[in-house]
Image (spheres, rainbow, N blue to C red):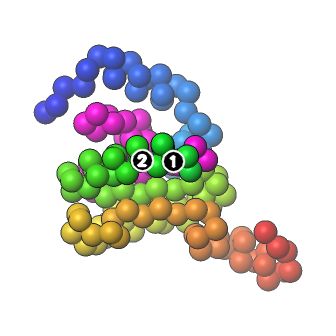
């Protein structure tokens, strides 16, 4: 078992106290084994990184990406993180803040499916699954709204 350095333990505690709106929303839905009976941890240290959410039983990392992930330096850092995780046979799911806030049920469905049906080998490109809100299926309410002529 890897021991977490004290400074990282303090940092993780701080991060849990000042979570973003999207992190708080997703945590409320993941905590207490609400998703497929799986236990998730938030702001969890994995190696030299800290991930937004982690399920050890499913070897699943869930990240919420804000707009700063569009910056070239952040994209390079994200690639380094992904290589670290996939090299350890972990699955990474990335969601935009918008997807978490506006299509929460669809995000949870994607998490459940990936946790229960992880799919291909760890080096397969399918393991990096990144979804923006526009790529997620419509919710039942949105389908009803579209049927009434509403536009999003």
Q: Is residue 84 above or below residue 143?
A: above
**Residues at discs 1 and 2 in contact (Cβ within 8 Å):** yes
> Circle 2 sits on which residue?
76
Name the quarter where the N terminus is drawn: top left
Residue 11 horizontal side relative to residue 149, left or right: left
Quadrant of the image occupied by residue 45: top left
Quadrant of the image occupied by residue 37: bottom left
Name the residue located 64 percent from the left edge and 73 percent from the top edge.
138
Q: How dense is the environment of label 1, judged by Cα within 10 Å: few (below 14), some, or many (20 and up)? A: few
Residue 17's x, y, as percent?
A: 52, 25
Which residue is situated farthest in the right direction here?
A: 149
Name the residue located 23 percent from the left edge and 63 percent from the top edge.
122
Name the quarter where the C terminus is drawn: bottom right
Q: How far apart are the two marked residues, 1 and 2, measured between alpha carbons?
A: 6 Å
Name the residue located 85 percent from the left edge and 80 percent from the top edge.
148
Residue 99 horizontal side relative to residue 27, left or right: right
Quadrant of the image occupied by residue 21: top right
Q: Main secondary structure of the magenta part?
A: strand
The answer to whether residue 146 shows anywhere in this view is yes
Q: Nearer the viewer, residue 68 or 115?
A: 68
Q: Which residues are magenta?
A: 40-68
Q: Label 2's element?
A: helix
Residue 71's x, y, as percent?
A: 55, 46
The answer to whether residue 105 shows anywhere in this view is no
Q: Nearer the viewer, residue 73 or 56?
A: 73
Residue 102's x, y, as percent?
A: 66, 57
> Circle 1 sits on which residue?
72
């Amino acid at each position: 078992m890897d021991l977490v350095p004290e400074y990282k333990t303090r940092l993780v505690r701080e991060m849990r106290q000042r979570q973003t709106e999207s992190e708080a929303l997703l945590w409320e839905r993941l905590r207490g084994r609400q998703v497929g009976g799986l236990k998730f941890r938030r702001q969890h240290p994995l190696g030299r990184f800290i991930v937004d959410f982690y399920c050890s039983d499913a070897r699943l990392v869930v990240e919420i990406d804000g707009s700063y992930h569009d910056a070239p330096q952040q994209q390079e850092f994200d690639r380094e993180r992904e290589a670290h995780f996939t090299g350890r046979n972990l699955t990474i799911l990335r969601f935009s803040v918008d997807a978490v806030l506006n299509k929460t049920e669809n995000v949870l469905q994607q998490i459940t499916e990936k946790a229960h049906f992880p799919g291909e080998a760890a080096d397969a490109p399918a393991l990096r699954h990144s979804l923006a809100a526009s790529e997620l299926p419509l919710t039942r309410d949105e389908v009803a709204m579209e049927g009434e002529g509403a536009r999003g």
